[in-house]
Image: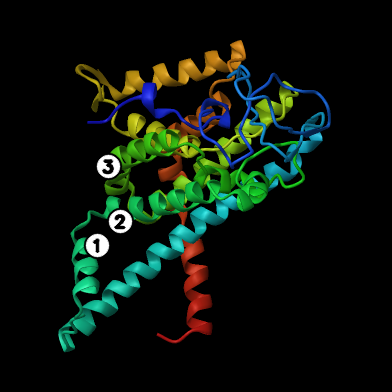
Amino acid sequence: MIFMKTLLTCHHSLSKWSGSNLSRNARITFQKFSTSPIKQVRSKIQGAKRKLDSFEPQIDGLIIDTSSLDGSKLWKPFIFTAVFSTTSLATAAIWEFENIHKKRRQIKDWLHHSRRKYGSMRSDVNKWWNNLTEGERIFAPLCLLNIIVFLAWKLPAFQPLMVKYFCSNPAAKNVCWPMVLSTFSHYSAMHIFANMYVLHSFSSGCVSNMGKEQFLGFYLAAGAIASFASYVHKVLINRPGLSLGASGAIMGVLGYCCTRFPDLELNIIFLPFFVFKASAAIKFIMGIDALGILLGWRFFDHAAHLGGALFGVFWSAYGSAYVWNKRGPVVETWYKFRKATFSD
């Protein structure tokens, strides 16, 4: 059964997950936010009390930029978000066209010959893959990418790279691609499990309704937009820091589902007797995130959650009809380019 934000919202600062070692002599520790422009994190005495009240993880030996923020920091992320989201959706439209074209060719090939792939492992993988639903075929590679990034966090040599590219921070020098890469990044096993569980719960229904191509374009755009919302909030309150996690994008999926299917009945995994409608659930969740922003709660990245959810609501109400259904010129342009460049 689908469970709600109590276990669902995990796009947050690394600060929630404080129990694991990064390396033999390095440990994530948590302090109140520092206003110094450059922060070098040093080892803390073992047993020191940790505070879970900051967006920002402090990783031993790494330098994190916490310089002051202003509106000029948002121009590059804004342009990147617009270009990346548009490109994701346009690429999804082209992918859909290519898939339709490919299916037609496969039908012709199948009528002329039957080609079997032998070998037990390859045959088993083929059988497993073919038995998956379309939604599961989208979820599987997304989940795999998240697992690979999660494992990379466990390699000490990769930690500087992970902080640089797989954590979003509006004060950093690299502000664009981390907005997307951070949505595939999880440090804690509980973090990735919760996010992937929820994504699996909602993705199949969304893919069935949207189609796999539109869903993937929408999911990537939702992640970028959620990260940009997080940037805007951090700039407004002048509080830079690292964030990561898939739940900004997942909140987009949740916002879409709950708006598209308002009468869908949901419940919490450990409270199956407590049933509520999707329309009420999304209002409650978005209300909690809005309250978290207003009251300055730091446990989750509430701005990213709210940004993702608002995009999901928008896409359900207007995006599919006025954006996706107007993809004809993009596909036509691609078809002409394809015809002039490639041969079938």
Residue 329 is left or right of residue 74, and the answer is: left
Are the residues tagged 1 and 2 within 8 Å (C-beta)?
Answer: yes
Alpha carbon of mark 1 to alpha carbon of mark 3: how far?
Answer: 18 Å
- Between 111 and 303, the residue placed more toward the observer is 303
Disc 2 is placed on an element classified as: helix
Instruction: Give neighbour class at mark 1: few <14, some 14-19, many 20+ (Cα, 10 Å).
Output: some
N-term-proximal mark, 1 vs 3: 1
Residue bearing the label numbered 1 = 129
Q: Residues within 10 Å of mark 3 (few under 14, many from 20)?
A: some
Residue at screen point 21% across, 61% down: 128
Instruction: Say left or right for 225 vs 209.
Output: right
User: Quick one: SS at disc 1?
Assistant: helix
Look at label 2 and name its amino acid: Arg
| 275 relative to 309, above or below | above
Label 1 with label 3: CB-CB less than 8 Å: no
C-alpha separation, residue under disc 1 versus residue under disc 2 = 7 Å
Identify which residue, 250 or 32, lies in the foreground: 32
**Residue positioned 68% across, 42% down in the render:** 78
Residue 188 badge: none
The quadrant the N terminus occupies is top left
Quadrant (top left/top right/bottom left/bottom right) for the C terminus: bottom left
Q: Is residue 13 visible?
A: no
Q: Say left or right for 335 vs 176.
A: left
* Residue name at image x 60 percent, y 48 percent: 156
Looking at the image, which residue is at 52% across and 26% down? Answer: 16
Q: Amino acid at mark 1?
A: Trp
Give the numbered dot on residue 137. Answer: 2
Percent position (x, y) of residue 183? 52, 43
Q: Which mark is residue 205?
A: 3
Residue type beneath disc 3: Gly
In the image, residue 268 sits, relative to residue 247, either above or below, namely above
